[in-house]
Image (cartoon, grey):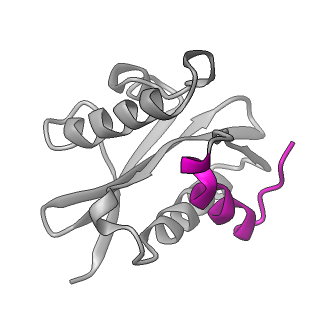
Amino acid sequence: MSVEIRIDSPLSAEVLPLLRRHLDLMWASSPPESVHALDPSELAAPGIDFFTLREGAAVLGMGAVKRIDDEHAELKSMHIVAEARGRGLARVLLDHLMAQARARGYTRLSLETGVEDVFAPARALYAAAGFVQC
């Protein structure tokens, strides 16, 4: 089965369980002062494009592009469910988010990832896509 990435609402009933899993992981994996994940209502704000990655009816992933200014955006809430990891879906979603940012005219794209061991695969993914630590 193929996957589909589409613009979506972080407030939709089928997306909220994934967002809850993501937020729970962020709070369980990082010190409170280092959790910068947005809640569903914050992800629904103007200036944020929210996407889901789906396989059939199943929501397997999500990510957002948040406008900072006319040239700069930040990736937010990128997450692939644990059961679907190891299939290259995170790279597919990341490539899509980066293409969307370019299409919107952003010339700088940032993201924030924790330093804890649980985030090592994410840091490796972003480094492989050309992101550099700053």
Q: Residue at x 74, y 63 (%)?
A: 127
Q: Residue at x 48, y 71 (%)?
A: 92
Query: Is 73 located above or below residue 68 in the figure?
Result: below
Location of the C terminus by quadrant is: top right
Query: Is 41 located above or below residue 1 in the figure?
Result: above
Residue range corresponding to the magenta coloring:
117-134
Q: Residue furthest front?
A: 117
Residue 18: x percent and y percent?
Answer: 27, 43
Location of residue 41 (image quadrant): top left
The answer to whether 6 appears left or right of 86 in the picture is: left
Q: Residue at x 62, y 23 (%)?
A: 34
The answer to whether 37 appears left or right of 108 in the picture is: left
Residue 79: x percent and y percent?
Answer: 43, 50
Instruction: State yes or no: residue 85 in magenta.
Output: no
Relative depth, front residue between 31 and 75: 31
Location of the N terminus by quadrant is: bottom left
The answer to whether 102 appears left or right of 108 in the picture is: left
Q: Residue furthest top?
A: 33
Query: Is 57 located above or below residue 8 in the figure?
Result: below
Instruction: State yes or no: residue 127 in magenta.
Output: yes
The answer to whether 66 appears left or right of 80 in the picture is: right
